Structure formats: C-alpha cells, structure tokens
Amino acid sequence: MQPSKPKLFVLSSLGKIFKQSIVLVALFLVWEIAPRIGLVDQAFFPTFSSVLISWWNLIITGELFAHFAASITRSFTGFALAVIITIPLGLVIGWYPLARELLNPVLELFRNTAALALLPVFMLLMGIGETSKIAIVIFACTWPILLNTIAAVGSVDPLLIKSARSMNISSFKLFLKVILPASVPMIFTGIRMAGTAAILVLIAAEMVGAKEGLGYLITYSQYNFQIPEMYAGILTIALLGLLINQGLSLLERKFSKWKQHVNG
C-alpha cells in the first residue's frame, strides 16, 4: 500500500528542511564543541550556548530590541527612498538612449566608488546624526537598483517591442504593458542586492558614530569585553539579513507571477 499524497508531501517537506538545515546545525555544533575542547580560546570565541544565553538576556532587558529598532528604521528608510528615487530614474535612463549616453560616465564613476569610502564625507557634511546614516544607505542602495533597472529596460526582447508596436499602441501603454513587466525580474535582482547593502553599510556607519543600533552594540560589547553579547549582535544582523532577503524573494515571486506562468 502506497503512502497517501498528504503523507508524501509531509515527508518531502521534512526531507527538504533536513537537507537545508543539516550543514547549519553541524556548524553550530562545531561552534559549541570547539571552545569546550580547547581548539579556540573561550575568552575570544565563546560557546554557541553562551551566546544564545546572552542573546536571550538582551531580549529580556529590551536592549536588543532598542538597537534592532534603530537599525531597521535607518536601513528601511534609506532603502525605501532609494527604491522610490532610482527605479523611475533607471526606467527613464534605460528607455531614452540619449539620457543613457549622457549619464553613463557619471554612473560608471559612482558605481565603482565604495559607499564606506565616502562615509567621512557624509559625516562631515551632515554630522553624525540620523541624516548621514540614512544618506549613506541611500547612496549604497542606489547603484545596484539603478544599474539593474537600466540594464533590464535595455535587455527587453526586441520582438516583444516590435509586436506591441505593430498593434499601434501608444508609447505609454508600450512602456506600461511590455517594458515594465519584462524588466521586473532584473529590477528585483538589484533590489535584493540593495537590501543586503543597506544592512552592511549601515552597520559599519553605526560602528563609527552612533549611540544605538546593532553596529553600536557590537562595537560597545567589544570595547567592554562583553564577547558573548558581541556575537549575539552579529547573529542578529545575520538573521535580519536573512529575513530581508526572504521577504524580497517573496515580493519578487509575487510580481513575477506572469513570467512563471509563461515558463510553466
């Protein structure tokens, strides 16, 4: 007697979860065992369980939430502003060849400029408050989104454009119904890259000049030799990055349903 479909689905799901988590579980086991048997110094690399205890204590006291809220607010604000500004700009630049030719040298210059290299400039011009941190996040997020949007518009299949124009539709409808939907997957690639950049750049900025945030928590814990708390902050950043990536992946699948149906 063969297993029923629900049982097969459950078994398949459990097998998938096991395959995806086995390496991660092994990594945490090594992390727990290595300090205990003396492979690494516990003073500088504490056991995973002690890091979890410190992480839980930070949650209980509310300290972790305060730092998390500060970082997520800054990163989300900068990321959202970058998306709002750069996607329309990228669509325009990608659609009009003259704009692309005029702006290409500037784009090439800034795309190769590391955001963190400009952090002192942002701090000098805007101070060490919230404005400079949000501005550096906007700068870091702008280029992946902008360049992928420009490339997305330029890589739309010419046959799609030619077929649409043969139906005598207006340029606005052509852009709305053909160019924009076809560009969505590549645009979301840039958005996901920007989501990662938003966290990494912000954490570095918080380590330099901030009184709260996950970057500040890590630096403060290091200076005060609160090593388990430092690793707890690092784990929180890793979880935050994972959540952002998963959330953006869900949005990408939602906005790209038409492509999945075509491929299916």
Image (cartoon, rainbow, N blue to C red):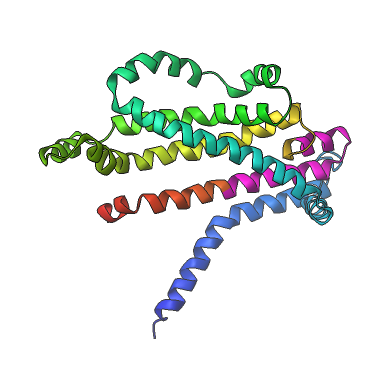
Residue 28 to residue 87: above or below: below
Q: Quadrant of residue 224?
A: top right
Q: Is residue 232 magenta?
A: yes
Residue depicted at x 34% and y 34% = 152
Which percent across, then down, holds residue 104?
A: 38, 17
The x, y position of residue 127, in whole percent, is 72, 22
Q: Nearer the viewer, residue 222 or 68?
A: 68
* Residue occupying the far bottom of the picture: 1
Residue 63 counted in the magenta span? no
Magenta residues (range): 216-243
Query: Is residue 90 shown left or right of residue 130?
Result: left
Q: Quadrant of the image for the C terminus? A: bottom left
Image quarter of residue 167: top left
Is residue 261 in sight in this rendering? yes
Q: Position of residue 4 (x, y in %)?
A: 41, 81
Give the residue drawn at x 49%, y 71%: 11
Count of numbered circles on the image? 0
Q: Residue at x 76, y 27 (%)?
A: 209
Q: At x 79% / y 41%, what residue is drawn? A: 230
Q: Is residue 222 left or right of residue 206?
A: right
Taking depth in this image into account, of 242 and 133 the one nearest to the observer is 133
- Above or below residue 133? Residue 258 is below
